[in-house]
């Protein structure tokens, strides 16, 4: 499933290949894929004859600035992938089942130069919207400062993992990245967020940064050390202790029974 690292890879592809090309045709074959009141007619009117001037990201939301001043928001959902001129962003292993079936092209554009951009999504859980409310999202995980994290955690008695996954508080962290960062920080994901002391918050902040950097370099959010051990009866890769499998914040959570406290 695309997490912030996969969305960033898509953003880099859009930034390199989709900007400053005149949009000649808009393909919106799936009205259900258009969200927050957007219709095929409206999205065509908003994009036809325009071009993209910037490719941004906030958390898992992709943002394409349009020459008219509008902003096109793309959500990759559970299985979405961006293609520009048939080149796809992301690790082919992660998307092994994502073959090139045009029926999965939920939204797309043809540029005046003949090239294309498509959002391919077999599971149809992504979305396209116009002028999304970016401020409904918290600060982007890549830009999260230590004081901001301290304030976010200090305001909540919910489990620390649930707070980290709440996109309105921190944008971009999904299930695997949260488990990996908490494992690296030696913090129990079930701890009430406001019980973390200053040293623990600092450790978690460093672990989020390291997790994004290291897994980004390895090739995606599925490449974590703990992620490799998600399965029945597998031990902690650090100390060999049994891993706990619990549901926290509504998601299956793995943590170490010994070193995460
Ligand atoms: Zn351990």
Image: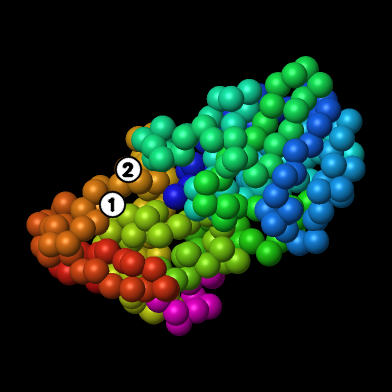
Task: Residue 60: give x, y in percent of width and height.
Answer: 57, 51
Q: Would the CB of label 1 be found within 8 Å of ligand 1? A: no
**The one of 41 and 143 positioned closer to us in this rendering:** 41
Which dot marks residue 227? 1
**Circle 2/circle 1 CB separation < 8 Å:** yes
Question: Which residues are drawn in magenta?
Answer: 150-159
Q: Residue 73 location, x and y as percent?
A: 71, 48
| Residue beneath the point at 46% across and 39% down | 98
Taking depth in this image into account, of 172 and 93 the one nearest to the observer is: 93
Q: Secondary structure at mark 2?
A: loop
Which residue does the image show at 89% across and 43% down from the upper left? 45
* Res. 180 image quadrant: bottom left
Q: CA distance from mark 2 to mark 1?
A: 7 Å
124 part of magenta stretch: no
Front-lying residue, 191 or 133: 133
Q: Secondary structure at mark 1?
A: helix
Residue 13 vs residue 52: left or right? left
Q: Report crowding for label 2: few under 14, some 14 to 19, many 20 or more residues within 10 A (C-alpha).
A: some
Determine the residue positioned at 37% across, 73% down: 248
Q: Residue furthest bottom?
A: 157
Q: Which residue is mark 2?
A: 223
Residue at the spot x=31%, y=66% of the render? 253
Callout 1: few (<14), some (14-19), or many (20+) C-alpha neighbours within 10 Å? Answer: some
The reply to whether residue 4 is visible in this rendering is no
Residue 143: percent from left, percent from top:
56, 50
Quarter of the image for residue 53 reads top right
What colour scheme does the image use? Answer: rainbow
Does 235 sit above or below residue 104?
below
Residue 218: quarter of image: top left
- Observer able to see residue 102: yes
Q: Quadrant of the C terminus?
A: bottom left
| Camera-nearest residue between 173 and 141 | 173
């Amino acid at each position: 499933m695309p997490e912030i690292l996969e969305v960033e890879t898509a953003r880099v592809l859009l930034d390199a290949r989709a900007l400053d090309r005149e949009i000649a045709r808009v393909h919106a074959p799936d009205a259900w894929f258009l969200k927050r009141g957007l219709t095929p007619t409206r999205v065509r009117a908003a994009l036809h004859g325009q071009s993209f001037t910037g490719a941004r990201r906030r958390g898992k939301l992709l943002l394409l600035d349009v020459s008219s001043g509008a902003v096109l928001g793309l959500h990759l959902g559970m299985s979405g992938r961006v293609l520009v001129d048939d080149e796809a962003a992301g690790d082919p292993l992660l998307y092994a089942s994502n073959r090139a079936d045009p029926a999965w092209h939920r939204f797309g554009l043809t540029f005046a130069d003949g090239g294309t951009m498509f959002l391919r999504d077999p599971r149809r859980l992504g979305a396209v919207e116009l002028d999304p409310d970016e401020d409904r999202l918290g600060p982007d995980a890549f830009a999260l400062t230590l004081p901001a994290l301290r304030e976010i955690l200090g305001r909540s008695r919910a489990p620390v993992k649930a707070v980290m996954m709440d996109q309105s508080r921190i944008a971009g962290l999904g299930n695997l990245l949260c488990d990996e960062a908490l494992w690296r920080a030696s913090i129990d994901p079930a701890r009430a967020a406001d019980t973390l002391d200053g040293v623990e918050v600092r450790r978690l902040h460093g672990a989020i940064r390291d997790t994004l950097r290291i897994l980004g370099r390895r090739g995606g959010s599925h490449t974590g050390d703990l992620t490799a051990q998600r399965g029945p009866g597998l031990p902690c890769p650090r100390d060999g202790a049994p891993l706990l499998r619990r549901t926290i914040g509504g998601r299956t959570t793995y943590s170490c029974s010994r070193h995460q406290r």
